[in-house]
Image (cartoon, rainbow, N blue to C red):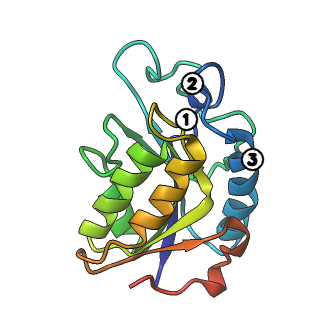
Amino acid sequence: MKIALLVIDMQQGLCEGEGRAYASDAVIARINPMANRLREAGVPIVFIQHESTAGYLEHGTREWQLADGLQVQPGDLRVRKKTPDAFLNTDLEALLRSRGVEELIVCGMHTEFCVDTTTRRALALGYPVTLVADAHTSEGNAVLTAPQVIAHHNATLTNISSFGPRVRLVASADVVPDALSPAT
């Protein structure tokens, strides 16, 4: 199966300041070598950026830019979105279909919003998903710490079976193109 890597919302404004996502530097440090291995194998890398129409994460602002330290190459793809669902009102599905992509690898932030929603939508569209267990993160919330949010979603998303395609967990170090097989 042809795969693509979705790197969701790894943006500067979410990696700094008061709303900084948990361990964002460590997540970036895991995404970079994984993306490089996949790139070398010809896997499309898609950076997805959330944007607002004004203020925080407004298109073109410093906060909207991809995070410092994230290694992006000229051949990588980009998708702009305005909702937690990277497929809704974007060209993501057409971009994937035009490249023959049949399976997705997902990492990024925020776990409980954009990673969760995009993963569930991918399943509904028929894409098996490999969720990179140690390369998605959250700020946490009033009820759960960030590590609890991450652990909860690692457990919850892998237990969804009603869509047909499934989610499986893989550590970033184990995301090697030859070792990946369909998560159905």
Q: Amino acid at mark 2?
A: Gly
- Estimate the spatial distance between the alpha carbons at disc 3 and disc 1, rounded to whole Å: 14 Å
Q: Earlier in the sequence, mark 2 or mark 1?
A: 2
> The C terminus appears in which quarter of the rendering?
bottom left
In the rendered view, does 87 fall on the left or right side of 43?
A: left
Q: Provide the residue designation for mark 1.
A: 139
Q: Which residue corresponds to the image point at 66% horizontal and 66% vertical from the top-left?
A: 39
Q: Provide the residue designation for mark 3.
A: 26
Most foreground residue, 99 or 35: 35
Element type at mark 1: loop
Element type at mark 2: loop
Residue 128 picture location, percent across and down: 39, 76
Question: Of all residues shown, which one is farthest toward the top?
Answer: 55
Check contact, mark 2 vs mark 3: CB within 8 A. Answer: no
- Estimate the spatial distance between the alpha carbons at disc 2 and disc 1, rounded to whole Å: 7 Å
Q: Which residue corresponds to the image point at 57% horizontal and 30% vertical from the top-left?
A: 14
Residue 67 picture location, percent across and down: 65, 35
Label 1 CA crowd tier, 10 Å (few <14, some 14–19, many 20+): many
Q: Which residue corresponds to the image point at 76% horizontal and 60% vertical from the top-left?
A: 33
Q: Provide the residue designation for mark 2.
A: 19
Q: Is residue 177 above or below residue 53?
A: below
- Estimate the spatial distance between the alpha carbons at disc 2 and disc 3, rounded to whole Å: 16 Å
Does residue 46 show up? no
Q: Is residue 124 above or below residue 89?
A: below
Label 3 CA crowd tier, 10 Å (few <14, some 14–19, many 20+): few
In the rendered view, does 128 fall on the left or right side of 30?
A: left
